Amino acid sequence: QVHLVQSGGGLVQAGGSLSLSCAASGKIFSIGNMYWYRQAPGLRRELVASITSSGSTNHVDSVKGRFTISRDNAKKTVYLKMNSLKPEDTADYYCAADVATTNLARYTTWGQGAQVTVSS
């Protein structure tokens, strides 16, 4: 099995910054794309950003210029740096990764989630 463990998040005032990290562990053969999603109360889970194994990134328009996804392949970790936070960024944030295990299984695994609250 492969596990993703998240850290970071919390409460911040509008205009502030927060960082999230997500580290993979377990019987990992390789990690492909990694993702950050968020889900606000009453809304569907939304893809915020993605990054390929070679470092190519995509960010949803609502966070472009404010959020940055990055990864450290040696540490099997993906990061989300969030600047200029707005109250509408308030949500539970989840990381995900496309993994291949040492016994040749391939699937997408998820972190446990982290709450981000932006006060106005």
Image (cartoon, helix red, strand yellow):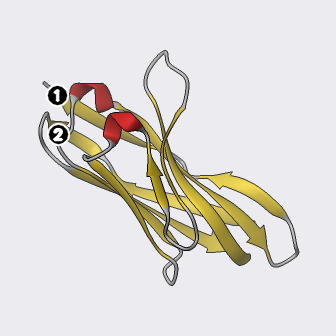
The quadrant where residue 97 appears: bottom right
Residue, disc 2: 12
Q: CA distance from mark 2 to mark 1?
A: 6 Å
Classed neighbour count for the residue bearing mark 1: other residues with Cα under 10 Å, few (<14), some (14–19), many (≥20): some
Residue, disc 1: 119
Which residue occupies 86% across, 66% down?
A: 105
Going from N to C along the chain, the mark reached first, 2 or 1, is 2
Which residue occupies 25% across, 46% down?
A: 66
* Left or right: 92 as drawn, with respect to 112: left
Above or below, 31 relative to 51: below
The one nearer the camera, 15 or 3, is 15
Can you name the residue that lies furthest to the top here? 42
Which residue occupies 32% across, 44% down?
A: 64
Q: Quadrant of the N terminus?
A: bottom right
Which residue occupies 11% across, 39% down?
A: 15
Position of residue 65 measured from the top left corner of the image (x, y, whole percent): 26, 47
What's the mark number on residue 58?
none
Position of residue 95 measured from the top left corner of the image (x, y, whole percent): 52, 51
Above or below, 21 relative to 110: below
Which SS class for mark 2?
strand
The quadrant where residue 31 appears: bottom right
The quadrant where residue 115 appears: top left
Which SS class for mark 1?
strand
Position of residue 92 measured from the top left corner of the image (x, y, whole percent): 43, 36
The one nearer the camera, 52 or 106, is 52
* Left or right: 10 as drawn, with respect to 55: left
Q: Amino acid at mark 1?
A: Ser
Q: Are marks 2 and 1 in contact (CB under 8 Å)?
A: yes
Position of residue 19 measured from the top left corner of the image (x, y, whole percent): 29, 55
Q: Quadrant of the C terminus?
A: top left
Q: Amino acid at mark 2?
A: Val
Above or below, 49 relative to 31: above
